[in-house]
Image: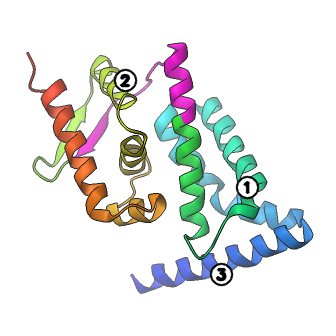
Amino acid sequence: MKSQGKRQDNRQKEDKVLIKRMLKRRDKKAADCLIRAYYDEIYAYVYKQVFDKSMAMDLTQDIFLHMLKGLQHYDSSKASFRTWLYKLATNLIIDYMRQQSRQNKREHIIDDIMLVDDTEPLIKITNREKLDQIMTYIETVDFDIQQIFALKIFAEKTFMEISQILSIKESTIKTKYYRLIKVIKERFYYEN
């Protein structure tokens, strides 16, 4: 546990140095190092939500382009770079999902997804039609709940990490998440 914390501290220090070089000198090597450090992690996060390799690559590229364009707005006193990057990624993914929903072209290529709930360890969704119904429903809830759901389910973030990414109290995150899971259960599992 201590070694993981030390690695995170080192990563944060490296990020700050790279960001400083990028902002002051427009250092392309620093930008490349920063992107390489997070590319696989962000790509995996995106892929778990769109289930399309090509689209995940495109969205990941867009995320890093937005990161480069908006880096001057990043404030390390408010959040770590990783947290800021996940927030940016989450917002762009949700925008993409909304666009796809409006165009009515969504297809889920997925075998299963698990919704975690403390009262019942897992709800395993293997029915694609049911998953599509749930994802369509999730697109109708408040934006912050969509973000919480995406970060918990697709990025497998803890409530504490989600709290840091979204700048919302951890207790509020839990309340919103569990309320959503309860509604999903009632709507999609207890109906006949």
Q: Please identify, in this view, whether the residue under mark 3 or under mark 1 is nearer the observer.
A: 1
Q: CA gap, disc 1 to disc 2?
A: 30 Å
The answer to whether marks 3 and 1 mark residues whose Cβ atoms lie closer than 8 Å is no
Q: Tell me the magenta residue range.
A: 95-116
Q: Tell me the quarter of the image containing the C terminus.
A: top left
The answer to whether marks 1 and 2 mark residues whose Cβ atoms lie closer than 8 Å is no
Q: What element carries label 2?
A: helix
What residue did someone put label 2 on? 136
The answer to whether marks 3 and 2 mark residues whose Cβ atoms lie closer than 8 Å is no
Query: How far from the left and from the top, in percent, is residue 17?
Result: 75, 78
What residue did someone put label 1 on? 70
- Identify the amino acid type marked 1: Gly
Query: For this rendering, which residue is in front, 94 or 122?
Result: 94
Query: For this rendering, which residue is in front, 166 or 39?
Result: 166
Query: How far from the left and from the top, in percent, is residue 145?
Result: 36, 43
- Identify the amino acid type marked 3: Lys
Q: Tag 2 or tag 1, which sits nearer the N-term? A: 1
Q: Tag 2 or tag 3, which sits nearer the N-term? A: 3
